[in-house]
Image (spheres, helix red, strand yellow):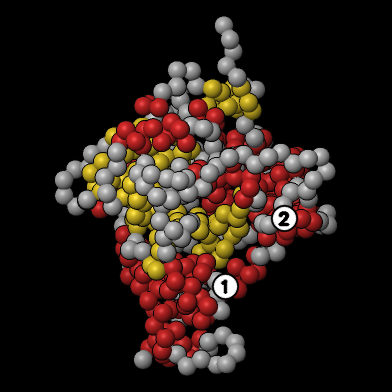
Amino acid sequence: MTRARREKLSPVDNAWLRMDRPGNLMTICGVLMFAEPLDVARVRAMLERRFLRFARFRERPVERADGAYWEASSGFRLDDHLVIARLPRGDADQALKDYVSSLIATPLPAGRPRWQFHVIPRYRQGSVLIARVHHCYADGIALVRVMLSMTDSAPDGPPAMPFEAPPRRRAGEEAAADDPLSQILAPVGNVMDTARKLGRMLIDKGAAIWSDPARAVAFAQQGSALTAEVARLALMSQDSPTRFKGTVTQGKRVAWTDPLALDDVKAVGKALGASVNDVLLACVAGALRDYLTEHGDGVDGVTVRALVPVNLRPVEQAWKLGNRFGLVFLELPLGIGNPVERLYAVRANMRALKDSCQPLVALGLLAAMGAGPRALQEALLVALARNATAVMTNVPGPRQPLYLAGSRIDRLMFWVPQSGDIGMGVSIISYGGIVQFGLVTDEGLCPDPDRIAARFGEEFEKLLLVTLMSPWPFEGDLDPALAAAVAAA
């Protein structure tokens, strides 16, 4: 009997495999809406030809006594992973939200490769395609590249982004340095090698650094920027307690917003001296603030932290799949009522993280989670959940319209998984000149995410209105006090 080919999971991929909890499954869920009906036979042929070109998607992760491995799935059939679904009659949007919510809370079958595609042939005048992929296969950047490789620039081609492995570099030839983050991290050498070394060091120290402040301080005194950052994270105080924090349940609720015009967001950002990301995250902070206020909760001095993924992978290496990203803790100042002042606070917090070692340290933490004992993983998960309220991801997509299986993609959305007891995920994606917000919350902590999602657009309108109405200085930022007066007028 021939033994199935096996390949060991990397420590970081294994961390995501082991991170599944009944209340938080590590499944990335994406929704593609089409203005016209999909041809199911053509979708099946496209998946066979373009998705399954990646051999990894024919393999399943298995856990053995000696570790976790990728193992070829015997008797693989595409039809086991392709689901044709029907929504109940009535409110189409609500029916779709209910369906996606149930999928996010449902584990992928463990006995075969952990991914699925769900086709809803009839949704309004078009169709919907839902993709579910376990996080252990790849991070969001790689999966977006996989999705783009499945699309065309016209109904019958050509491919919008051919996804072929780049040629091997010759000995001594350096990799292209077109990724700004790779240049920031250049002093620490190879990202993955450094993360593995840091992971081994954290395994040796065990969970003691996170449970004993004195040991964390001693660790910081070893002198390197990396050890100082580890200690800083270990000593980080909890963010503000709100109704968004608590023990998660097994129920999830998703929501999405009406899209914003990307050019409008860029214009406001340029006028206020902020990035598109600053503007969007400030809108998220404002929406969360308004939701708490509506429920009678105090917001003075409230700051919540979001775990924000940071890509550590050069674009030309996305075809390799796997997970290669770090995380930063971004503080969202919900206690600031003035929308412009809130935006500048978010901008300052983002800039403070620019030269931080946090992304690399977080990758090292993930490596330690996957390679170390489960007790260490549990301690680290508890620490992450204690210090953060949400996971927030912003993915820039293509500006031109794309086609999949001959049908035009009208809208793109996705939802990110949360770890431990983190009960909220905010996803932002741009596509075709629009920006789309997606929100997933734990049903026990926030049963009505639609009420938050509806406020994203309102918060942007506030920034837009203040920008248009305010007198501007020749140089420098808009005076927050002046902006507040204009907003109150």
Q: Secondary structure at mark 1?
A: helix
Q: Is residue 45 left or right of residue 362?
A: left
Query: Left or right: where does residue 486 sit relative to residue 219?
Result: left
Residue 21 in sight:
no
Q: Position of residue 367 (x, y in %)?
A: 66, 41
Look at mark 1 in the image and give the residue it sits on.
347
The answer to whether 480 is drawn above or below residue 75 in the figure is below
SS for dot 2: loop
Q: Nearer the viewer, mark 2 or mark 1?
A: 2
Residue at the outermost left position: 89
Count of all numbered marks drawn on residues in the image: 2
Which residue occupies the foreground of this view, 254 or 385?
254
- For the residue pair 345 and 45, the one nearer the viewer reads as 45
Q: Quadrant of residue 371?
A: top right
Q: Is residue 140 above or below residue 264?
A: above
The disc label shown at residue 325, or none:
none
